[in-house]
Image: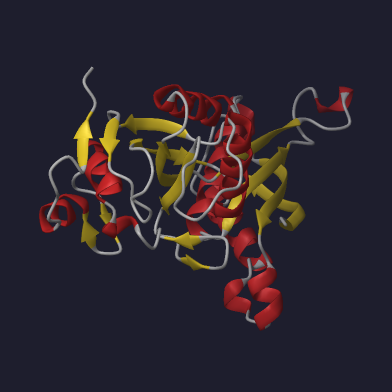
Amino acid sequence: MTDRVFVSNLCLHGHHGLFPEETRLGQKFYIDIECAVDLAPAGLSDDYEKAVGYDTLCDIATAVSAAGPYKLIETLGHRIAEAVLARFYIITEVVVRVRKPSAPMAAMFDNVGVEIRRRRRRRIGLSLGSNVGNKIANIETALSLLRTENVVEFDGISKFYRTAPWGNEDQDWFVNVCAIGWTTMTPQDVLKAFKRIEFHVGRVPTVRWGPRVIDIDILFIDDIEADGPELTLPHRDMFNRAFVLVPLNEIAPDLSIGGRVIHAEVERMALKAGEVEPLAE
């Protein structure tokens, strides 16, 4: 569920424009701001602090406009959008429309303006594993789908590791990797995308910790905390799993999650021989 908060036709007077007379004399601008946000916490608690205040949106637009002048209304819209995202962490997307009814060509059109759309990017870490069929190909397919479906923009992917089974040792060995990157999706939408991609690659229901064609786990999304039946953030078992920590340590040793630094957690673990080993290239 995505709710919307919006302010329409906020009228501001600014000295913005490409032409000298526009910046000298000033002109009117009409600004619309529309935000995507989950308002359930505010609705359930009736707590203003958990909402997005219309007055604050207006104050942001006014302050950004006053910090000008700007030659381009694209700049004005972009800076308002970035300021809104910076002020309200719960907003996942913001759309800012800036209209100039007094623009030189405005008489020829009903509206002259720009629309700026910005989505929040959040840091994400994930673990992928397979121990059925062509294990490496299964993981490579999942990574490719995560890219092409714009679920994650990767900037770090570990080597492939041969890992011992965890939880249920009576099964074949696994191949595991970890990856980090950016996502513009909510945690719930990321989870849905992971499940859809797992199904596409060929995963079928099995016993807990049992064999699987592909398994994709969310390790963390920024510093978001969640504790629900379907999603726990950070992942509740990640600091107990060598097949997560060792690959993650390869690409992000200084990463801190909940105050725990990855390289320190790897040093803490008493790894068994053959528990996690990089595959030969």
Q: Is residue 143 left or right of residue 100?
A: left
Give x and y (percent) for residue 189: 62, 48
- Residue in view at x 30 percent, y 29 percent: 160
Observer-nearest residue: 155 or 115?
155
Residue 21 figure quarter: top right
Task: Specify whether residue 208 is in view.
Answer: yes
Going 12% across and 55% down the picture, which residue do you hit? 270
Q: Is residue 39 left or right of residue 150?
A: right
Q: How many marks?
A: 0
**Quarter that holds the N terminus:** bottom right
Residue 130's image quarter? top left
Q: Position of residue 31 (x, y in %)?
A: 71, 47
Q: Is residue 15 visible?
A: no
Give the image location of residue 2, x and y in percent: 71, 55
Classify 245 as above or below 20. below
Split into 4 quadrants, where in the image is the C terminus? top left
Question: Which residue is drawn at the image coordinates 56% and 46% (left, top)?
Answer: 190
- The residue at the point 70 percent across, 40 percent down is 98
Residue 94 place in picture, x, y as percent: 63, 47
Q: Which of the colour schemes (rainbow, by chain, secondary structure, one colour) is used?
A: secondary structure
Task: From the viewer's perspective, tell me whether residue 66 is left or right of residue 155.
Answer: right
Tell me if 223 is positioned left or right of 280 in this view. Answer: right
- Hey, which residue is sitting farthest bottom in the picture? 46
Tell which of 148 and 8 is nearer to you. Answer: 148
Farthest residue to the front: give it: 170
